[in-house]
Amino acid sequence: MKYVGQAIKRKEDPRLVSGSSSFVDDLALPGMLHTAVARSIHAHARIKRIDISQAWKLAGVTAVVTGEEIAGKCGPIPVAGEIHGMKKPVMHLLAVGKVIYVGQPVAAVVASDKYIARDAADLIEIEYEPLPAVTNPEKAIEPGSPVIHEQFSDNIAYTFGFETGNTEEAFKNADVVVKERFVNQRLAPVSMETRGAVATVQAPDRELVIWSSTQIPHLLKTQLAVMVGVPEHRTRVITPEVGGGFGSKLNVYAEEGLVAYLALKTGKPVKWIEGRRENLACTIHGRDQINDVELALKKDGTILGMRAKVVADIGGYYQLLTAIIPQLTGLLAPGAYRVPTFKFDLVGAFTNKMATDAYRGAGRPEATYLIERIVDCAAQKLKMDPAEIRRKNFPQPSEFPFATSGGVVYDSANYEKALDKALQLADYAGLRKKQAEMRAQGKYMGIGLSSYVEICAMGPSVAMPAGGWESGSVRIEPTGKVTVLTGASPHGQGQETSFSQIVADEFGIGIDDVFVQHGDTARIPYGIGTFGSRATAVGGTAIYMAVQDLKAKLAGIAAHILQSSPDKIVFEDGKLIAGDADKSMTFGAAVTQAYIARNLPPGMEPGLDRTRFFEPSNFTFPFGTHVCVVEIDEETGEPKITKYVAVDDCGNVINPLLAEGQIHGGIVQGVAQALYEEVVYDENGQLLTGSLMDYALPRAHDLPMLELDRTVTPSPVNPMGVKGVGEAGTIGSTPAVVNAIVDALSPLGVTHIDMPVRPEKIWKILKGRKAS
Amino acid sequence: MLPVSLQTSFPKGMLMTQRVRITINGKLFESDVEPRLLLTDFIRGVAGLTGTHVGCETSICGACTILANGLAVKSCTMFAVQADGSDLVTIEGMAKDGQLHPLQQSFWEEHGLQCGYCTTGMIMCAHQLLARNATPTEAEIRDGLTGNLCRCTGYQNIVKAVQSASGKMRQTQNVAAGD
Amino acid sequence: MIAQHFEYTVATSLGEAVSLLQKYGDRAKLLAGGHSLVPMMKLRLASPEVLIDIGRLSELSYVMEENGALRIGALTTHHSIESSEVVGRGCRSLAEAAGEIGDIQVRNKGTIGGSVAHADPAADYPATLLAFDATIVTLGPRGERSIHASDFFVDMLTTALEPGEIVREIRIPVHSGRSGSAYLKFAQKASGFAICGVSAVVDLDGAGAISKVAVGITGVGNKAFRGAGTETALRGQQPSPGLLRSACEKAAAGVVALDDIHASAGYRLDLARIYARRALEKAVERAG
């Protein structure tokens, strides 16, 4: 192994650090027109009248479209994630009849430049009859609430639930029951590049080409072809450089359909680039669940059972996966523990807000938060050390594969090892000592643990709404250079590098002789995309499999020529070595033979091109323990993270540089949920956090250096033993931070504090103590 | 808000445009522009230098950071007419003779970028930071980068990249001084 | 986002700026660094028909000390103030306030005159300008006026500037002898603006008693204000932790505090108390 496991600098970076890469807004096609969207200013209203006459009068405007026109010509926004019996409102690309959230597209303008398009969109007059807005998901599902989709009787989008074992019995037998309500607030993904798309109808074949900043080019292609009525084999989606997604670009949006439709309508290339305020209002949001959780335990801390009631805020309608995200919460809620009985009840609620959907972690951060918080609540009540209650309930390595009461089978783990390593790295005993000293001085210092597990490598197709496999295609060119095509569509994760590492090692060639391509449906075999920490574990495996096929073929050729047997051929240093015959030939020479095809083993086809589709048998389940230390300003309530230790286990690691980078970013995103971020709508459904002046993202000065380490427990689910790492940091970190804050305040009798834990919330608690 | 009549009284072609001359990376760009054209759009659209990005609308994210007359500024918060006669450096002007600038090199080596969208502005800001303080502490680097948002890296490797570049740039200076 | 159309004109001298302002009246706005105005225009929250660019008037960019006063040209950037040795020596809390504004890029471009004229209730400078009894010198069609900072900031986004008037200079009396000042801020997490910013100035007499004291508070109310109750309680007293603490209980007495998603009124008022004490402690320490 020459490259795998090494911290190889990324192949992607020279173009990115020099500014020469091309994001979607960097495209400038001849004759390109620009789109701007007029959006609803009401959360809930009937559209009385739309006057587009002023917009039309503006010089440079070439098209103005409204919902009436679009609804008859384009299909609705696609919904892939379905739950049995769910209500299915139809959502058109532009509003028809009524609007159900602030920012909903109502009309679109096409003009010769983006400035004119904006002017024209602002000149569209929309007359509304406001309706009462429904913003609180619990009130939304109460009888008597105004109904958002009038064809239905109420705002209950769906209900879902299951019970494993007999929870009633477990709770009856419990020594202790802890109960808490956790609000997992609504978040905005905020990739630094907003969404955007360019569509054009390309001569000579009238192929509809769409460049979109998306995580799922192939799925998008299929959906857009159906939506605008162009045959799929005349539709092509290209992802240029994608400036982050975090799940928000794992979707098919109205604006993508609009630019496709408008390109067909005008016959010109049409561009739409989302503004940041549009991004905060009209790109999917994440989380937004209310979790009522109860945990039953014996007095020694052994967990007997858990009940979780979840109200999930769907928003006004479903985007691609909206409905099923909260379901994942149920699958993972037992976390890294033996929870013998578990009852999960979920209600999805329609509200007059933007749809929620997959945001980094997607349903699993909510699960991890509720289990990691309730376990801490139990430890607090039982006066147990949080590390010990965790240790007590971990399944042992020998118990894997481990079937959980959430209904999934964990692949492999050693939770205790990661916990111990984290405690050691953080000097847990020393921290507790320091805490006691600080408490004696009246200071608030807290230590928070989170021993998370997560569901990655999504996933087996049986558990996925639109296929859980991935494609990988490897072509060795006649000159010995290797072209790799992946159906995964990385957008910052670095798979151009890590996949090159895998392929170069397997063939025994240099990493620069491998070139990884992705994100063009005309070049790449059909694939699923990059999300759910799946690119390496599923996409990488497909490539690994294709490479094995080609190695077998090359070994056959080499054995034939070197008079050895294929199983004796070793790929090393650019050579195929027949150890038994003490002979070798260069990789290039063997490749040439495959193309010249005059001296191939009998029955072997020429060429070296292989596509494989990997269907995983299961998810993978990375895990780890995070330790967060906070100190609290006893006057202002400001929490400050003074130390952060993370020990993660994502199985085998292809490139530690990339894995650590994912964990850094993930942790900071998770910390930001705990401390800063929250999408806030007022009671009228107006968005109060509509710009980055009000929606707080973490900045460079918010955190100390994170201290990382890892354990390695290979996954049995795929041949490389990898698990995935894209969401681990986000999933593991949030509860660690909140646990630390609650721990700091526990001398005051605090058992829970809701996120984001802004200083003011702590200040109120401190203030209350002083008053009493 | 302007009355509607005023907005529509500026048909394309009759708009009052103004000639601006802006030097970017040593090359002069001259164009007649609407006064409302943002400097970012001049750089990206008129000069075709698309390495300068736009990430917010409120001067928060710093993706559009460039150097204007040697000072790091957010080019989305300036009209092109304000920069008439200015000398700008964008990310495309950082590498010299095919050699990446030490900051670019360090961001690469330290894995200081993932999606790469914020990176160009981040590098331009870091350039300003190091120009004023060649040996910043970790805290000074973190404080100096508060005008640049990154959603991928958690900033850790960005901080390391700036530290590394600081070392490289001092070394180069020392070598130059020794000549 | 995209601003609405406007006419752009460059003032080549201060006099020209004044006459252009007179010519266009309230159709026009002055553009200095643009860091208050341009974002508002992009969001179409402000749509002036004419922009008069005074950003090139280098004659208005200076910091000097003259006859016991700091004179700072309106177009001096936050960075220049933050890094000015003269300011750091004579009016440290102003340098600290400048350094707390936005970020490197914003400080490179934004100007003190622009910030002061915009009068954002959460801006950093007003606390210090009030605490130092600064004077805002304006130039208008009827000539020059000197407006005391306490009269200048009238309300949220409203100043005593009359139509046609330009901020020309900020004048700050320099304290000599045993004097110290400090600016401390609790920032809104997203925007970086002050939820509470306090500037404290303390002069000590030969016996170490507080001879002069001023506390300016920004971000808390609809305009910056002086913590008069605190000042009264401290004047003539020997500074001690207990005294500072009790004096600051009244820091924001009688003020109607802002209340929004970022901080409640009650929190702002308590922050005023806490930050007043911390800023005073620092100022006392610096006064030595």
Image (cartoon, grey):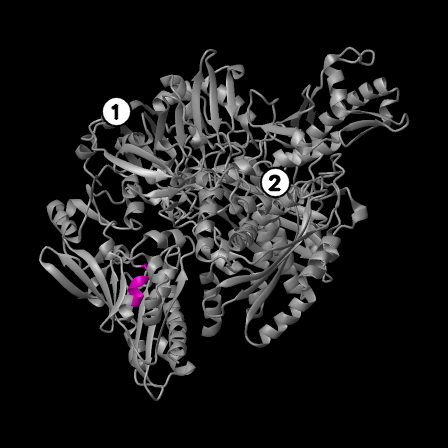
C183 shown above or below A604: below
Q: Residue furthest front?
A: B179
The one of A368 and B132 positioned closer to us in this rendering: B132
Which mark's residue is nearer the viewer, 1 or 2? 1
**Which residue shows up at 48% across the image and 32% down it?**
A22
- Residue A165, x across and y down, in percent: 71, 45
- Residue A622, x across and y down, in percent: 68, 44
Q: Which residues are magenta?
A: C122-128
Circles 1 and 2 on the same chain: yes
Q: Is residue C123 magenta?
A: yes
Q: Chain of mark 2?
A: A
Residue, disc 1:
A56
Residue, disc 2:
A328
Q: Chain of mark 1?
A: A
State the SS at label 2.
helix
Can residue A469 be seen in this snapshot?
A: no
Q: What's the distance in space between the residues labelled 1 and 2, CA to CA? A: 47 Å
- Residue A299, x across and y down, in percent: 72, 62
State the SS at label 1.
helix
**Number of labelled discs?**
2
The one of A664 and A609 positioned closer to us in this rendering: A609
Mark sitting earlier along the chain (1/2): 1
Q: Amino acid at mark 1?
A: Trp
Q: Amino acid at mark 2?
A: Leu
- Residue A771, x across and y down, in percent: 45, 73
